[in-house]
């Protein structure tokens, strides 16, 4: 329609130009003939220059109006916003005349508007028809987005010549992205009634989907919002997505077209959601029949959620059977895929014989051997209880309860009976291997020692074959020695080594002559103690003491070295051993220093160590034991003088520090008196002490009693002076001694 109008305008302009040219030629020709030659030359040059300027100026004006975008975006204030839109659009690098084509008449009109500056005379001009858009976007030129193969453009452009590209892409001039509500210009009666789906039409109707001839949504289009991973074509420009409840292929109905149940353009809610009529697609047991079986299951939606997970469907029973949940979790039921494994869907009954459907092999095994009680699965298995352990066997086999194995199924296969009895070596491989290295008599079946249902009593059965050893062991005093397994390792039965076996319970001697084999002294079977004659078996040359020292064990600890025997004296003679520790000489601190071993009543003479002291004592009436207690330190021996010299020790008590102790004058072991001159060395030269008869102090002085000599003491020697001053009480009152 635009091309014929353009041709008519151009013809009118040409006729106008021809008329002006004819009139101009006639006037110019007449004037030119009358003009002088020189004048003509001047006029010709002037006309040529004017024509050139007119042509150049006209071309520049034409180019400015038609091509230069500044004419539109700067010279016309009405185009300011339009120019801004163009600068931010995808066509900002495209020239105006690439899309906008004007006729000569429109050019002249715009030139006239520019010259006269009268924008009200602009009028409509430079219309863009869709052929201009198609020249780029349907040209197969990779520089431009190609739309000829997209669903939206096939329906709206290629199949309908009345729709122009600018009808959608230029609702606002140069705003090329279609408006959100642009579809309503034509589809004004179509609305979306589903809450949450108020998005662009192209969010569901994929306008740019390649290779499509229809704009109806595909089954996977809904997944753009509902959990799908397929990206929408150019979503940042043409569509809006919203996070919505995911409906994935792993969910019920997730692989079906949503439009089977959802019709978002239908106003009536009952007709818009048709998914509640399950029987429309599912030819199953009618709800009324299900209600007769179990009234609580009369609605499909109670168990089947339209978009729930397929895995969740298997667990949906628990939503209603909440009271049964504690009895279902970690039970036999949880070992099955779902409740529907036993409870048939839509019937909800499980028969006890239904176990055979899946467990046919187990059923055949039981039929071959078992009693009738084992043929009924429910006797041992309870579907809503924890899986049975061997303890369930005790319900019928209580007499075998209580042995050390975990439960009956440790040895018995519950579905095979005696045929499925497990060999002992399956669990006791180490013990089975040990038997092969032991005595030949023990290489028989395990049941030769172990009762099948009481394996822990095997050690009490040794006496059945080893009666003599068992009788001796039963008389052993320690309880451990009455058990064969204390020394004989189970299943090997040989004693690997006497020392090693005894050491497992007893600390063995680390030194001395008794660190050899224990059986040298101890009998392996029977009371382990050593009798009175036991030591004599080896120590027959050792003399034996009498009395309470006769038993070797009174001094010798059986598992210590013989040299440690002296330390045992303290057990009976604690007072003596404690007192002897105060002696300075080392030989007095050990009992063997004085007492002979194995004959303690014979004491070693003191003279064997103290010959000089013993020789001095023999010249007196004293003996070593008269003064010395053999188990006390010798420093206290002077205190024993009073036992024989009671009067003398009593007399010296008041003599002062010098004469108050015996050792002040008496020498030990000889006990001879010390000369008085040792202390009183000046007395012998004073007064009467210088007389020859007075040189012996003891002649006048009592050495133990305090006091000066009286008259009678002097008359002992001076008898001729008996009548000399008979009334005088003392002689030394006149006869001075100092």
Image: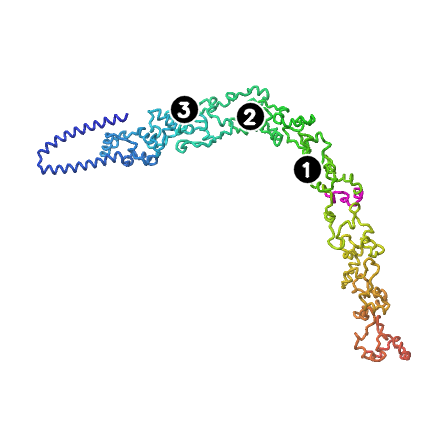
- Which residue, given by chain and number where applicable, does mark 1 sit on? 425
277 horizontally vs 676: left or right: left
- Which residue, given by chain and number where applicable, does mark 2 sit on? 303
731 horizontally vs 479: left or right: right
Circles 2, 3 touching at the beta carbon (< 8 Å)? no
Front-most of residues 552 and 94: 552
**In the image, residue 473 above or below residue 700:** above
Closer mark to the observer between disc 3 and disc 1:
1
Q: Quadrant of residue 339?
A: top right
Q: Position of residue 727 (x, y in %)?
A: 89, 77
Q: Position of residue 4 (x, y in %)?
A: 25, 25
Going from N to C along the chain, the mark reached first, 3 or 1, is 3
- Which residue, given by chain and number where applicable, does mark 3 sit on? 190
The stretch of residues the image draws in magenta is: 470-489
Q: Position of residue 622 (x, y in %)?
A: 85, 67
Disc 3 secondary structure class: loop
Taking the spot 72% from the left edge, 33% from the top edge, the residue there is 401
Closer mark to the observer between disc 2 and disc 3:
2
């Amino acid at each position: 329609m635009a091309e014929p109008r353009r041709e008519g305008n151009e013809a009118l302009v040409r006729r106008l130009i021809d008329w002006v040219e004819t009139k101009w030629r006639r006037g110019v020709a007449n004037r030119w003939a009358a003009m002088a030659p020189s004048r003509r030359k001047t006029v010709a040059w002037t006309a040529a220059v004017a024509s050139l300027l007119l042509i150049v100026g006209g071309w520049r004006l034409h180019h400015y109006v038609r091509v230069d975008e500044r004419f539109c975006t700067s010279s016309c204030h009405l185009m300011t916003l339009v120019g801004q839109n163009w600068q931010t659009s995808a066509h900002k690098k495209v020239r105006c005349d690439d899309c906008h084509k004007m006729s000569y008449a429109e050019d002249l009109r715009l030139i006239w508007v520019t010259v006269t500056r009268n924008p009200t005379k602009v009028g409509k001009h430079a219309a863009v028809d869709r052929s201009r858009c198609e020249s780029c976007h349907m040209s197969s030129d990779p520089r431009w987005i190609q739309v000829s193969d997209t669903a939206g453009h096939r329906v709206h452009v290629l199949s309908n010549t009345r729709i122009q590209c600018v009808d959608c892409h230029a609702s606002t001039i140069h705003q090329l992205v279609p408006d959100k509500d642009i579809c309503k210009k034509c589809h004004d009666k179509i609305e979306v009634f589903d809450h949450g789906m108020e998005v662009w039409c192209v969010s569901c109707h994929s306008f740019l989907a390649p290779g499509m001839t229809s704009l109806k949504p595909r089954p996977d289009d809904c997944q753009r919002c509902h959990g799908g991973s397929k990206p929408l074509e150019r979503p940042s420009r043409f569509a809006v997505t919203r996070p919505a409840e995911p409906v994935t292929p792993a969910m019920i109905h997730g692989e079906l077209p949503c439009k089977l149940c959802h019709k978002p353009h239908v106003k009536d809610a009952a007709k818009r959601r048709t998914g509640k009529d399950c029987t429309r697609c599912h030819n199953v047991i009618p709800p009324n029949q299900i209600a007769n079986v179990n009234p609580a299951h009369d609605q499909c939606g109670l168990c089947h959620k339209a978009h729930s997970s397929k895995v969740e469907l298997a667990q949906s029973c628990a939503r209603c059977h909440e009271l049964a949940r504690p009895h279902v979790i970690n039970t036999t039921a949880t070992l099955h895929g779902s409740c529907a494994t036993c409870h048939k869907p839509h019937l909800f009954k499980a028969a006890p014989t239904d176990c055979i459907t899946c467990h046919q092999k187990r059923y055949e095994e039981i039929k071959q051997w078992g009693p009738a009680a084992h043929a009924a699965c429910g006797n041992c298995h309870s579907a809503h209880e924890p899986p049975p352990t061997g303890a369930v066997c005790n319900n019928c086999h209580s007499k075998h309860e209580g042995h050390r194995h975990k439960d009956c199924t440790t040895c018995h296969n519950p579905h095979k009976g005696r045929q499925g009895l497990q060999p002992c070596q399956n669990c006791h491989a180490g013990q089975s291997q040990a038997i092969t290295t032991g005595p030949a008599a023990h290489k028989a079946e395990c049941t030769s020692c172990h009762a099948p249902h009481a394996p822990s009593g095997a050690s009490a059965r040794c006496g059945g074959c080893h009666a003599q050893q068992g009788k001796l062991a039963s008389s052993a005093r320690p309880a451990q020695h009455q058990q064969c397994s204390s020394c004989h390792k189970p299943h090997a039965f040989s004693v690997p080594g006497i020392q090693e076996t005894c050491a497992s319970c007893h600390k063995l001697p680390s030194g001395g002559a008794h660190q050899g084999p224990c059986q040298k002294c101890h009998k392996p079977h029977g009371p382990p103690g050593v009798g009175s004659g036991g030591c004599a078996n080896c120590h027959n040359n050792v003399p034996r003491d009498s009395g309470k020292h006769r038993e070797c064990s009174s001094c010798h600890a059986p598992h210590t070295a013989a040299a440690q025997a002296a330390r045992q004296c303290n057990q009976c003679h604690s007072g003596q051993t404690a007192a002897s520790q105060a002696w300075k000489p080392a030989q007095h601190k050990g009992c063997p220093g004085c007492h002979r071993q194995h004959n303690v009543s014979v004491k070693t003479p003191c003279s064997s160590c103290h010959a000089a002291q013993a020789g001095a004592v023999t010249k007196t009436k004293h003996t070593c034991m008269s003064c010395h207690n053999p188990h006390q330190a010798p420093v206290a021996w002077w205190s024993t003088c009073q036992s024989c010299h009671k009067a003398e020790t009593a007399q010296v008590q008041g003599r002062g520090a010098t004469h108050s102790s015996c050792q002040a004058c008496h020498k030990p072991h000889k006990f001879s008196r010390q000369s008085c001159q040792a202390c009183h060395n000046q007395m012998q030269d004073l007064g009467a002490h210088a007389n020859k008869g007075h040189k012996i102090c003891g002649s006048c002085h009592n050495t133990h009693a305090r006091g000066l000599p009286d008259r009678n003491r002097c008359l002992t020697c001076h008898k001729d002076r008996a009548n000399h001053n008979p009334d005088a009480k003392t002689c030394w009152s006149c006869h001075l001694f100092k």
